[in-house]
Amino acid sequence: KQEVTQIPAALSVPEGENLVLNCSFTDSAIYNLQWFRQDPGKGLTSLLLIQSSQREQTSGRLNASLDKSSGRSTLYIAASQPGDSATYLCAAARLEHGSGNTGKLIFGQGTTLQVKP
Amino acid sequence: NAGVTQTPKFQVLKTGQSMTLQCAQDMNHEYMSWYRQDPGMGLRLIHYSVGAGITDQGEVPNGYNVSRSTTEDFPLRLLSAAPSQTSVYFCASSAGHPSTDTQYFGPGTRLTVL
C-alpha cells in the first residue's frame, strides 16, 4: 500500500531564507507526484506536477524534484516570503495495474511553514 | 468562472441524521472527487466520478453515497451521520485525469457530528 510521508510536520524560518520541504513515498510505481498549498481554512491550490518520467518542475521561486529510485520528492522555495506561510502537501498518484490509472492520489499529512518577517 | 463551489460552509448534525453536501463546478470538467481531511490523516479519497453517470469508490467510501447526473454537480450524501464523520470535506475537479491534470479544489465544508 502506498504511503506518503512529509517531514517535518512544521517549519519556521526567517524571511529570505531558502528552504526545502521533503516528501517520501513507499512505492516507486507512481504515476506522478504533485505539490499543493493550503492556506488556513481554505481548499488546496495546485503548485507543481511532476510526471514519473520527469525529474523536476519549476514555477517562479518554486522547484520540485522527483527521485523515484529513492522514493523522494523535494520542494525547494527560494528567497522565502511571509506570504509563503501555509501548509504544503505532496500527493502521489498511484499506478493502478490492470484497469489502468484511476487517478487516486495518496496525500501526505503536510508541512506547515511559517516565514517570519 | 466561480470555479468549484461547495455548500454549506459549516454544518452541525446529530448522530443518525442525513444530509447532502453540495459541490458544483462551472469549468466543464469531467473528473470530480470528494476528499475528507482529518488531523494527522491527510486527505483521503471518498468517491470520484470520471463523467456524468459514472462514479466509483475511493479509499474511505463507507457511510457515503454519490451520484453524478450532470457534468456540473457532484453531491455527497451522508446516509446516517456518525461522530467519526466529523471532518472537513473537499470537492475537487479536473479537466482530464486527476493524476495528470491540475485539480481545482473547493473551499471545503466543515462538518461536526454530535
Image (spheres, coloured by chain):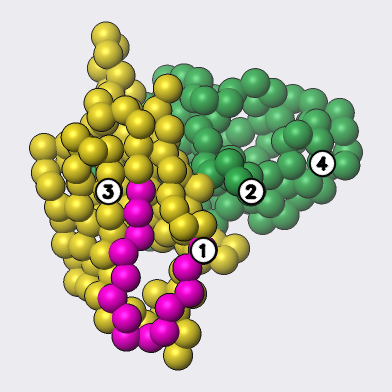
Chain colours: A yellow, B green
Magenta residues span A10-23
Left or right: residue B81 compared with residue B51: right
Please state which of the two labelled residues, at mark 4 or mark 1, is closer to the viewer: 1
Q: In terms of sequence position, does the residue under pointer 1 or pointer 3 come before the other? A: 1
Do labels 2 and 4 touch, CB within 8 Å? no
Q: Is residue B92 above or below residue B108?
A: above
Residue ID at (79%, 31%): B81
Position of the C terminus of chain B, as image quadrant, is top right
Percent across and percent down for residue A96 are: 30, 19
Q: Chain of mark 1?
A: A
Q: CA distance from mark 3 to mark 2?
A: 22 Å
Query: Across the whole image, how many numbered discs are drawn on residues?
Result: 4
Instruction: Residue type at mark 2: give it.
Output: Pro
Disc 4 is placed on an element classified as strand
**Circle number at residue A19:** none
Residue that label 4 marks: B113
Q: CA distance from mark 4 to mark 3?
A: 37 Å
Residue that label 1 marks: A10
